[in-house]
Image (cartoon, rainbow, N blue to C red):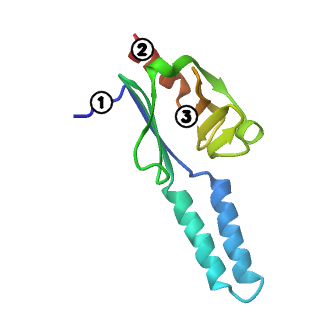
Amino acid sequence: MEETPLFREVQRFRQPWLWTLLGGVALLMIVLGPVSWGGLVVVGAVAGFVFSLRLTTEVRGDGIYLKMWPIHRSFRRIPWSEIERYEAKGYSPLREFGGWGIRWAPGKLAYNVRGSRGVWIERMNERDVLVGSQHSEEFVEAIDEAIR
């Protein structure tokens, strides 16, 4: 039986600018020339994929769990024994990681969907992780409670 998480957050890509961009590309394809049905299918597939993406973050008794569905079928766990330090902090997704989603940078990894707040997790002998969160303070409070 799976335990009830101390903290759970599900985030989706629902930013208006993203949907305006995808819709604008589709509209330009229709207006500017002969309709490329293949191109519209590709734009539709990309829109469907982005719409289905969701980042689920949980704090449980044995660690922090992350899943970016449908990329991850199961949760990725960061056990408490790997965590050296953690803190809620602001960040710039574009400047620090080059965008949103699952992003890699030298020595660090980011899971972010929107916004500019998250929890920075420094790990022993592993890549540091930034988890974007709309509720970063509650996320840190849940980690404090789980570690006690």
Q: In the rendered view, would you say 121 is above or below 100?
A: above
Q: Earlier in the sequence, mark 1 or mark 3?
A: 1
Coordinates of residue 7 in the picture (x, y in percent): 41, 28
Which label's residue is closer to the chain start, 2 or 3? 3
| Dot 3 crowding, Cα within 10 Å, few <14, some 14–19, many 20+ | some
The residue wearing badge 3 is 134
Of residues 120 and 14, the one drawn nearer to the viewer in this rendering: 120
Query: Horizontal and vertical percent for residue 69?
Result: 46, 50
Disc 2 marks a residue whose amino acid type is Ile
Three-letter code for the amino acid on which mark 1 is drawn: Thr
Between the C-alphas of marks 1 and 3, the distance is 20 Å
Residue ranking furthest to the left: 1
Disc 3 is placed on an element classified as loop
At mark 1, the secondary structure is loop
Which quadrant does the C terminus fall into?
top left
Placement of the N terminus among the 4 image quadrants: top left
Q: Which image quadrant for residue 18?
A: bottom right
Q: Residue at x 71, y 79 (%)?
A: 29
Q: Nearer the viewer, mark 1 or mark 3?
A: 1
Residue to which mark 2 is pinned: 147
Q: Quadrant of residue 77?
A: top left
Residue at (74, 36) in percent of width and height = 96
Q: Residue at x 71, y 40 (%)?
A: 97
The residue wearing badge 1 is 4
Q: Position of residue 121 (x, y in %)?
A: 58, 24
Q: Position of residue 118 (x, y in %)?
A: 60, 30
Residue at the extreme front: 125
